[in-house]
Image (cartoon, grey):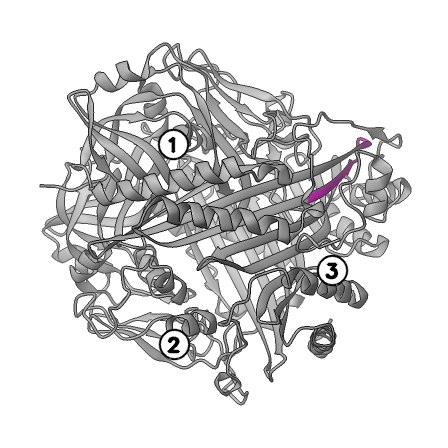
């Protein structure tokens, strides 16, 4: 068999069988208990073990040829001990009894007391599978990925004579996760993740413009299809072309209409992070005193969903063994729930919402978003655009950020239009928009019935950890945001 | 593994890869250890210990190339890993530009001791670290009734690298680093402003251990009650702490990758004016105990001090071996070391005192820059300055423009760099910046 780029593990896609995962990490139930006992030996309230084996492959096309590839293997176990809301953490990249006991003792030192008993019975947790895989990445050779990259290159060049360069890449990740905690919970997960990126560069009258597009999912290699490639190529060419026409709007406060899908970045930055319960538990979020209060118009319902089929933001269980759900965070305009990990759920005396996530076994889990999206509203898209006298319409983004305490959030617009007297007019690009989270949420004055998800490759950073997320939104209008631009 | 064991392992992997079909091989072994302690409101919030290892093998097989890394460092597993990587590499397309650097360019040893490693870090007791972080917290905790939360952090790390190539490079490096950090959040009528302060150093004895919590608190209290002001063109003073952020797009545009991908607004600008005469930047890897100092880069290329921008004229790019060959340019090393901005005569306070009306920017919030065109737009926070005095904090505003234009409007560089950062960039004064607000 031809390697995917790398395998370095013992077999292809493990079945959901606990013993295969135990064998994979060369551990036994007795050893897991022994390590947990060591972790709890200084009086911790809770301890967990997060075993991970992750294989990453990356192949890139440049100058019409797939001649760049890289791969990475990460293997280890993270050991966490909680004492109240205090955390002790250590990890080891060598899974032996000796190394694990050493790490467990380090993590245990967050507590300073006599040891506590652990639950001796093992409770095997069979989670639902939100991302069934047809063909695993380990059974997909680099040779099978190359034609898709070559096709995207040909398609983009074929669609426009101004194209001078194309870069395209496929990144696939396969993670094996085995989880065990002091409550006896044993769970295992097989997590696929893939993205396909393409960047198109065009030259016209001495000017150079580029635009990058991407798609991502928790899928095996069935993700790669000619249809996907063709759609992405068309998207890249159209958006790059538009850049030549685009300019900057006038600077200042104005009405902003957000397109369906990608504009979900608004939810992620304006309110999503500030709803993460660690910030609220520590009282540093601008939403800390807003639980059960009216924060938006009645037609606004927002959820953070970890259960969407094959979605980049989905998880079968979160990174601390809790079931994942579709958490309603704003219901009919009222803030109904924060996004919890185990520590914050205990603090607020609620059930964890399955938002405890980590970048890898090298990091502690903290509350993170999954797919943050807004349900349909009562308006029509045309009606919303027609209602704007002077404003902008925005539909492609590259990045955003938020200041949790002050509530100021931003997102960077790669493409959009000026709206004048209810009509889209001049294309715009490369401007930052800034607003205040609670104000912007309250200022969502219209929402259409066209909600959809963005399947672009969104990655969220917090506390030095990156996790895959997604977002979704219907067309919405915000009364007032500060738009970067030019002063006459 | 000690350094000698790492050299032995790297050489074994190289020998194995050569025997298995590679014509050239490069292997690096990286190891890092770190300890982090977070204190929140007088209680330990988090104690973490991290020990990482990784081996990266770059393979040049029949003019085909791949780079592969793993943290499973047992010899037999590594050999299997190399076998699979070689087999997969053969399926890639040929790339005539992919070869190891010319050995003439390698660092040959014999350089001055850069004094980058404080091995005493390993013997510091956990209690000492906790006490340090608690003392930092104590400078702010309960010092003002508006405080909601104070957190402090202590972090130390040691990292080492061994690099060996099949065409004659052998080198190792090691460095330490320590940081003390505090962040404070306060309650106000408008949100919960927060700010931070930190000190970092390579050596425990050089680490400044006081006035961290105190500064974080002072900075946070000053931010209460921000107002945005009218959109318009104003002079901007950019505080040293945030000044590197405005330079990053210039640095991205100087890389061989950006030049080759036509994603650089500085392509073809060598020996041309790209900024005002105030801008002079050297890349200096030779500063003793400088955070970015090193004798050789990730490819083994020997490094020396060189001009990047002189009196506003572009003098040098950052070109690695691969993109150098593709672009027909000599490699200079693809990454920066210490970025040393030529200093002026006064600090930020001095500039503020002379400003009639403008905005002092103390932080950025999001935004981005289009690498092809240099067009940027960033969210900012800071203060309105009038007649030499700070009037009130501002937030929720953007600055928008073009990199070439904004750096041509640079009128003054301060004399106030932040020690502990490889970007030795002072506070800057820039004229005629487009601000968007009300």
Q: Does label 1 or label 3 sit earlier along the sequence?
A: 3
Q: Residues within 10 Å of mark 1 (few under 14, many from 20)?
A: many
Please state if B318 lies on the left or on the right of A309 as rendered.
left
The residue that mark 1 highlights is B187
Task: Count up the numbered dots.
Answer: 3
Do the residues indicated by labels 2 and 1 lie within the same chain of the protein? yes
The residue that mark 3 highlights is B72
Q: In terms of image quadrants, where is residue B257?
A: bottom left
**Label number found at residue A101:** none
The range drawn in magenta is A175-185
Say what secondary structure mark 2 lies in. loop
- Residue B332 lies, with reference to residue A255, above or below; the image says below
Q: In terms of image quadrants, where is residue A124?
A: top right
Do the residues indicated by labels 2 and 3 lie within the same chain of the protein? yes
- Is residue B435 shown in magenta? no
- Residue B107 lies, with reference to residue B276, above or below; the image says below
The residue that mark 2 highlights is B284
Q: CA distance from mark 2 to mark 3?
A: 35 Å
Foreground label between 2 and 1: 2
Q: Does label 2 or label 3 sit earlier along the sequence?
A: 3
Foreground label between 1 and 3: 3
Residue at 82% across, 46% down = A24
The outermost residue toward the right is A30
Chain letter of disc 3 in the image: B
């Amino acid at each position: 068999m031809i390697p995917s780029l790398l395998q370095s593990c013992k077999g292809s896609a493990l079945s959901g069988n606990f013993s295969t995962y135990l064998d994979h990490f060369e551990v036994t139930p007795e050893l897991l208990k022994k390590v947990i006992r060591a972790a709890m030996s200084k009086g911790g309230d809770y301890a967990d073990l997060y075993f991970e084996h992750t294989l990453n492959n990356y192949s890139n096309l440049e100058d019409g040829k797939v001649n760049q590839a890289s791969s990475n293997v990460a293997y280890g176990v993270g050991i966490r001990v909680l004492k109240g809301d205090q955390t002790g953490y250590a990890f080891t990249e060598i899974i032996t009894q000796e190394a694990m006991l050493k790490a467990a003792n380090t993590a245990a030192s967050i507590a300073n007391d006599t040891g506590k008993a652990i639950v001796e019975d093992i409770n095997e947790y069979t989670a639902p599978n939100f991302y069934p895989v047809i063909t695993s990445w380990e059974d997909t050779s680099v040779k099978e990925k190359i034609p898709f990259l070559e096709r995207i290159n040909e398609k983009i060049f074929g669609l426009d004579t101004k194209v001078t360069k194309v870069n395209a890449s496929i990144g696939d990740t396969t993670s094996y996760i085995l989880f065990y905690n002091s409550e006896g919970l044993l769970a295992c997960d097989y997590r696929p993740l893939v993205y396909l990126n393409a960047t198109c560069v065009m030259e016209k009258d001495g000017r150079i413009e580029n635009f990058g597009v991407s798609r991502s999912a928790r899928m095996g290699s069935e993700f790669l299809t000619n249809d996907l490639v063709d759609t992405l190529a068309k998207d890249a060419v159209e958006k790059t072309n538009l850049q030549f026409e685009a300019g900057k709007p006038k600077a200042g406060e104005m009405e902003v209409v957000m397109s369906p899908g990608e504009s979900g970045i608004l939810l992620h930055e304006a309110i999503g992070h500030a709803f993460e319960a660690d910030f609220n538990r520590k009282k540093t979020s601008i939403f800390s005193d807003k639980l059960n209060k009216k924060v938006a118009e009645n037609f606004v319902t927002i959820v953070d969903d970890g259960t969407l089929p094959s979605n980049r933001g989905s998880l079968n269980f979160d990174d601390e063994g809790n079931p994942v759900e579709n958490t309603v965070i704003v219901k009919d305009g009222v803030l109904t729930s924060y996004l919890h990990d185990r520590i914050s759920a205990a603090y607020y005396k609620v059930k964890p919402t399955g938002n405890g996530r980590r970048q890898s076994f090298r990091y502690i889990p903290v509350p993170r978003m999954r797919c943050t999206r807004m349900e349909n509203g009562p308006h029509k898209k045309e009606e919303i655009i027609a209602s704007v006298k002077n404003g902008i319409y925005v539909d492609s983004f590259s990045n955003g950020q938020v200041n949790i305490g002050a509530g100021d959030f931003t997102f960077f617009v790669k493409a959009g239009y000026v709206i004048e007297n209810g009509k889209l007019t001049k294309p715009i690009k490369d401007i930052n928009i800034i607003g205040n989270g609670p104000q912007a949420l309250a200022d969502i004055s219209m929402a259409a019935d066209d909600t959809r998800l963005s399947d672009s490759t969104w990655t969220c950073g917090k506390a030095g950890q990156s996790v895959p997320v997604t977002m979704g939104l219907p067309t919405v209008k915000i009364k007032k945001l500060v738009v970067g631009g030019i002063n006459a | 593994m000690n350094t000698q064991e790492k050299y032995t392992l790297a050489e074994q992997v190289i020998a194995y890869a050569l025997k298995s079909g590679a014509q050239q091989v490069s292997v690096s072994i990286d190891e890092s250890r770190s300890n982090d302690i977070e204190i929140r409101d007088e209680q330990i919030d988090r104690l973490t210990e991290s020990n990482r290892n990784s081996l990266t093998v770059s393979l040049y097989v029949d003019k085909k190339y791949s780079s592969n890394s793993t943290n499973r460092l047992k010899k037999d597993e590594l050999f299997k890993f190399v076998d699979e990587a070689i087999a997969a590499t053969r399926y890639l397309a040929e790339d005539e530009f992919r070869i190891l650097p010319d050995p003439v360019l390698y660092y040959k040893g014999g350089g001055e001791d850069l004094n980058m490693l404080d091995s005493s870090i390993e013997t510091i007791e956990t209690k000492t670290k906790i006490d340090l972080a608690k003392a930092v917290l104590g400078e702010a905790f309960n010092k003002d009734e508006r405080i909601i939360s104070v957190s402090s952090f202590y972090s130390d790390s040691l990292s080492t690298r061994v690099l060996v190539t099949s065409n004659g490079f052998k080198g190792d490096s090691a460095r330490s680093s320590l940081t003390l950090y505090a962040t404070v959040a306060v309650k106000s009528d408008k949100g919960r402003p927060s700010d931070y302060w930190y000190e970092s150093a390579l050596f425990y004895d050089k680490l400044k251990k006081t006035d961290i919590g105190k500064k974080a608190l002072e900075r946070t209290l000053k931010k209460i009650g921000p107002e945005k002001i009218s959109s318009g063109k104003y002079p901007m003073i950019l505080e040293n702490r945030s000044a590197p952020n405005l330079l990053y797009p210039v640095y991205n545009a100087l890389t061989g990758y950006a030049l080759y991908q036509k994603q650089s607004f500085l392509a073809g600008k060598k020996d041309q004016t790209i900024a005002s005469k105030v801008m002079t930047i050297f890349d200096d890897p030779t500063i003793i105990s400088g955070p970015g100092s090193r004798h050789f880069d990730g490819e083994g290329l020997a490094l020396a001090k060189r001009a990047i921008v002189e009196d506003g004229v572009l003098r040098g790019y950052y070109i690695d071996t691969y993109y150098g060959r593709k672009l027909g340019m000599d490699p200079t090393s693809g990454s920066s070391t210490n970025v040393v901005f030529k200093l002026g005569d006064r600090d930020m306070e001095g500039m503020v005192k002379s400003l009639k009306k403008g905005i002092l920017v103390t932080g950025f919030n999001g935004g981005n820059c289009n690498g092809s065109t240099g067009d940027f737009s960033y969210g900012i926070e800071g203060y309105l300055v009038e007649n030499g005095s700070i009037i009130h904090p501002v937030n929720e505003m953007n600055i928008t423009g073009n990199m070439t234009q904004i750096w041509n409007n640079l009128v003054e560089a301060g004399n106030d760099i932040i020690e502990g950062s490889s970007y030795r960039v002072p506070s800057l004064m820039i004229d005629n910046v487009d601000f968007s607000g009300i």
